[in-house]
Structure formats: structure tokens, C-alpha cells
Image: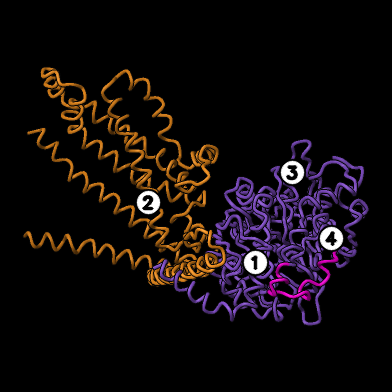
Amino acid sequence: MTLLTMNLSKLKKSLCGLALVSSYAVTSFTASALGYPEKEELKFGFIKLTDMAPIAIAYEKGFFEDEGLYVTIEAQANWKVLLDGVIDGRLDGAHMLAGQPIAASIGYGTSAEIITPFSMDLNGNGITVSNDIWQQMKGNIPKQADGKPVHPIKADALKPVVEKYAEQGKPFNMGMVFPVSTHNYELRYWLAAGGIHPGYYAPHKGDTSGQLDADVLLSVTPPPQMPATLEAGTIYGYCVGEPWNQQAVFKGIGVPVVTDYEIWKDNPEKVFGISKTFAEKYPNTTIRLTRALIRAAKWLDENDNANRPEAVKILSQSNYVGADYDVIANSMTGTFEYEKGDKRSVPDFNVFFRYNATYPYYSDAIWYLTQMRRWGQISTDKSDDWYKQVAEQVYRPDIYKKAAQSLIDDKLMTNADFAEVFTEDGYRNPQTHFIDGIVYDGTKPNEYINKFSIGLKSGETL
Amino acid sequence: MIANESIKQLLLPFVGIVCFMIIWAMAANNIQTSLGQFPGPSHVFEQFGNLYQEHNAEREKAASFYQRQEKRNADRVAKDPNYQPKIRSYTGKETFIDQIGTSLKTVLSGFILAAIIAIPLGIAIGLSQTLNTAINPIIQIFKPVSPLAWLPLVTMVVSALYTTADPMFAKSFIVSLVTVTLCCLWPMVINTCVGVSSINQDWVNVSKVLSLPSATHIRRIVLPAAIPSIFIGMRMSIGIAWMVLIAAEMLAQNPGLGKFVWDEFQNGSSQSLSRIMAAVLVIGLIGFLLDRSMLALQRLLSWDKDSAQR
């Protein structure tokens, strides 16, 4: 049967050959320019979060298959298992916390060479507190004319609550998803901006709990378990990606107080991580999987998010995120529900392609490094050049640019889709829009670190 | 009288099940979780339908996956005649029914491997007091170890040792299998040993008088006499194996029913609880069937014992 179909299609090919000459020439040219993938069967890992969408879409829309890649997608139990999977080769690539490849490269936690050619999204996280804590915070928050709280809510409102717990000698526990996760840094950023100390790490003394001098004790919980852990009362609040903040609202167990969009507008989020050995051994495969992911990201943002409802439907399948359609749709379609019934418009809550979201900017990597230094995960001073070198080791715009160029050559995308990408030096212009008003310039990491009132500064060690 | 008895035999289990359903439905109505109401029998029944439909939908997707692949292969062969087309297996998700298959395969493989090790070992220990004294402490120490305590060790060791480029079995399968084996080894060893060491002394004497070679002694005298105890051990083991496997799959995220339960718990959708409950029922039913088939096997094989006694 197979043989027969093959012969038939061969016959068809030769018959239609002449008619197809022009379009044929284009594809065969790039196939030889790009080359077939060296490894066709791939396994990618992800954590149940809406920002894994580019992987699910690239699979469901056939973008991986268009590249000749046969991809299996597998949910992982937690970020540690996922990281180990990429390091030991059980996974060929994964939806990763931006901090994971960076920390692995500088040897914090696990040491390994992981790179990223593709940044998966901007924004997408929130900080949720339990109903009880929310009641205690609410009195400290100014109200709008309609009686709803004024957003963004700052940690200043939480400070008196934390102080009350401290007076009673009770620890104030909050959850984040991994020691080098965006969520850890965002939660710390928000707390510190409100004058609450989230604690230091001191790896050179063997202290990796991150609770030295802490007013609030942060601990690790895998994303999908956050609501259950909050419900059990083990933690009073958490920082996690979607849909696990909206899930708390639907379950009636907690209230999201702030989104990462409000902490830092358009902040870089997940990346797609592969090991350096993989990228070197299978260069064509690497470019091809990047192409598929770029197409998926574009699909997600196309025509003003017109495809989002379909994306939500895909994500709500039990093998992807699996939460209810309504829960996922809340944040994926440009809104966000804070306290039950208080649904507000956040059109850029999840950005997958706009604003060059997929381009791996060095300055994004450096921001993560500055936070690692700020909280002591990097225990000694480093020069500005060191920050740049690490960023260049891990973030690989060269691969991204090749993939983008070949998509343009294949007429699958246009130059307009990649505004500025080819002239990019990898450093975004100094970024404002932080909740504490501090400006971030990726070219001057040490200067940036010194601007914070809470956190280690140049020259300080623990 | 006899008719009366058989009616009772049929009727009482039915009454039991109906009562259970009523209590379950009533209890479910009164439990509110943050994911909604606890699923009653009707919700769970509905999920069985959904799960079956999902399975069919996935099979259709698989079929079109293979079609696309054949076409793609053909296209490539047309362009690049040296290319050896290869059919890769479907990359979609495992359905509930696939997961049942995976779990069953794993539990049986692990159990059979354990039996292959445990029964000869048990016979050896049963026959030799010296060996028994030497090995017994080890068995006693490992027997009460929780299966899940083995899991991290097994995972690490398998990852370190099982490193073929093109493995015949998935690593996750090996990990589950070894964990199952380690845990169902002990009841089989102990029961076989007890069965062997408590053989009627007269038979042993007969064997001695006839000066049977030891292989024949084991085959003709020891095995038939020990079979009932061996089967008691096997029945205990298969029950343990099934429980261990589900827990191991949940913890290690290895494919199977345990993973299904954990994934659903993580999904936290409004259907999750009824899907978990459906899985719980299936797990229980399979455990029951495994136990029954072991019993049936025992009845089938214990003719030897009767003839030996006669």
C-alpha cells in the first residue's frame, strides 16, 4: 500500500512537474540551503502553563511536521525534572524558565551548557494571595470611584500584614516555582519595592534556601500545585504563570493582586532551551525547530489575537495545560480577573510575537543575572563584561536570525514580521515601566544593581 | 434449596453494589471541593464515555498523521532518491485506554521478572537451612521497605546504566518495572521458602530412599508440594505490584494510569475529579481481575498437589 501510494505520487509529481516548476524551485532551493533535519524524532518537555502555547501550536498546526520534525510533547512534573531531562538528553528541548539556561551556564544549581535561540513570550505571570491575606491587605489599598481597588497594587499594602505576622512570631510563607525562576525574581522585586525583604542566598556558605534576613519566606512549589498548596494553607501567596492565578479566582481560594505586566511592562518570560551539544550536533534541526516555533508565535498573535480562542481550546486539552477553557481564556484573550468579578482589560497579558517577543535579547539575559547578583545567588562582584559574556554564551540570536531569514526566503513570513531583528545589537533601549520606577539599562548591569535599596550592591558579599 | 442459594449468590452482591452506589451518590452530593462537587456515579459514568470518545478521536488523528507522513516521505524520495523513507510512530498523546495497556504491560513484566528470580531463590532457601540463615536477615530488612523509597535509587541507577543509543524499552518503563520487581520479590521468596521447607517429611524420605537426583527431587516432590504456598505468595505479590506501580507512575510521571491520575490532578479542570474517580474504579477493577486470574491459574495448576497426596 505504501509503495503504491509512493509510486502514485511520484507519477503525479512528474506529470505536474512542469506546472509546479516555479514554486518547486523555491522550496528545493531552501531545502538544499537549509538541509534536512539531522534528527527527526524529538521529544520536548513543558510545564502546564499557558506560555507553553508556541510548542502546542507548532505541533497542532503542523509547523513541526512542515520542518520534517516528528515531535512528542510531554508534560513534566516540575522545573527540576524538566531541566535534568534536557541535560541528560531524555528531552531534546523544553519550555524553560529564562533563568534556567543562564544559571546552568554559570554553574548555579546544576552546571550544564544550555542555550536558547528563541524567547517564548512576554509577561504572563501574577502574584496571588489567599482570601484571608487579601482581607487584611484590602484596607491598605486606595479605592477608585467605583469602589474597586486602584491597580497596580504595591507590596506596601502587604507590609503591615507581614509585620503583624512577625510580631506574633509566625513565619510568612509564600511560594514561587524555582530558585532561578522569573517568578522568584518578580515576587522578590515586588516585595522589595514595597519595603519587604525577601531574603538572600549565600551559596558560598552552602545556604541555598534564599531566606537569610528574610521578612517573607519563599519556597518552591511546582506551578500546577500552587492552588492546592495555597488551599492547604502551607503558603499565604504565590507567584506563578497562568492559568494558576485565574484558577485561584475560579476556585474561590485566592485573589491575584498584581500581574508581572504591572511589575515590569513587557518583561521577558520563558525561553526554549536546548543543550549546546544538541545545537552543535544537529544544526539544521535546531534552525528548523526555531522556524516552527517562530511561526507558532506569530500565529498566536496574528490579527490582533484573533486565533487566541482556538489556542485556548487547544491548551485546555488534558495533555497540555488541561484547566477549564474559561480559566485559560481569562488571561489568554486579553483580560485578567483580579478579585472575583473584577475583570480588567490587559491586552498584552500574554505576548508571543509582538514587540519582537521571540528575539533572544542579551539585555533580557543580563536582567536575570542582575537579579541573581542582587539576591546573592551570584555571591561575588562581576564586571559588566562578564555579564555580557554570559549572555552571549546562552542567548543565541545568530540561530534566530538564520531561522528568520530562511522563513523570509521561503515566503512563509515577510521582512515586516521581523522589524529591527537584522539590525539588532541585542540590547533593548533603557527600559522604564518598573513598579518602583527604576530604569534598567542592559549595557550597565552594575550601575543597575546599585540602584536598589534592598539587595546586594557592588562590593557587598554576605 | 439449591436454587435459593444461587439466587442469594447473585442477588446479594447486586444489593451490595446498589447500596454502595446510593451511599456514594448521597455522599458526593454533600462534598463541595474547590473544583466543584465531588463526582457521583453518573458523572463518572459520563467520563467513561468521554474517555472512550477521546480515544477514538486520537486514533483518527493518528491515522491522518501516518497519511501525512507517507506523503511527506514520498515527496522527499521524489526529490532525493537516496533517501530511505522511515515510518515514525505516532507522536500524539496517550489516551486513557493506552495508559491502561501500558500499566498492564508494566505490571505483568515486573511481576514475571520477580517470579523468575523469587521462586528459584525461595526453593533454594527452603531446601538449605544454611542458605536460609544467611539470607533471611536481608529479606527481613528489605521486605518492609516502602516501594517508593526504592524509586529514586532505581531511577538514578537505571539512568546511569541503561544508556544504549537506540533502546528497545523506554527508560521510564524499565524504572517502573524494576520498582515493581523489587517490591513483589519478597512475598514470593518467603512463601516459596515456607512451602518448600514444610514438605511432608515422609515424601522427603521416599525421595531419599529412591535416591532421586536433586533436579528430579525438586521437580517431582518439592514443586508439587510447594505450589499452593508459591501461589499464595504470587497472589500477594501481584496485589502489591499493582499498588506499587500506580504509586510509582504518579511519583515518577512514568506513562500509565498513575500518570493519568496525576496529570488530571494537576490540570484541575472541572472534570478532573470525575476523571480521577473513573481511573480509581478502573484501577480497582484491574487489581481485582489480576487477583482472580492468579486464583484461576492456581486452581488450574494445583492438580499436581492432589495427585501427590493421593
What x and y, as percent, mark residue B92? 50, 64
Quickly name the residue at label 2.
B105
Do marks 1 and 4 share a subunit? Answer: yes
Quickly name the residue at label 3.
A108
Q: CA distance from mark 2 to mark 4?
A: 51 Å
Q: Which chain is orange?
A: B
Q: Color of chain A here?
A: purple
Disc nearer the start of the sequence (3/1): 3
Q: Mark 3 — on which chain does it sit?
A: A
Question: Viewed as shown, does residue B220 lie left or right of A224?
Answer: left
Q: Mark 2 — on which chain does it sit?
A: B
Q: Mark 4 — on which chain does it sit?
A: A
Q: CA distance from mark 3 to mark 4?
A: 24 Å
Mark 2 lies on a secondary structure that is: helix
Disc 1 crowd, CA 10 A, few/some/many (<14, 14-19, 20+): many
Do marks 3 and 4 share a subunit? Answer: yes
Image: magenta residue range: A406-425
Disc nearer the start of the sequence (1/4): 1
Task: Tell me the kind of residue under disc 4.
Answer: Gly
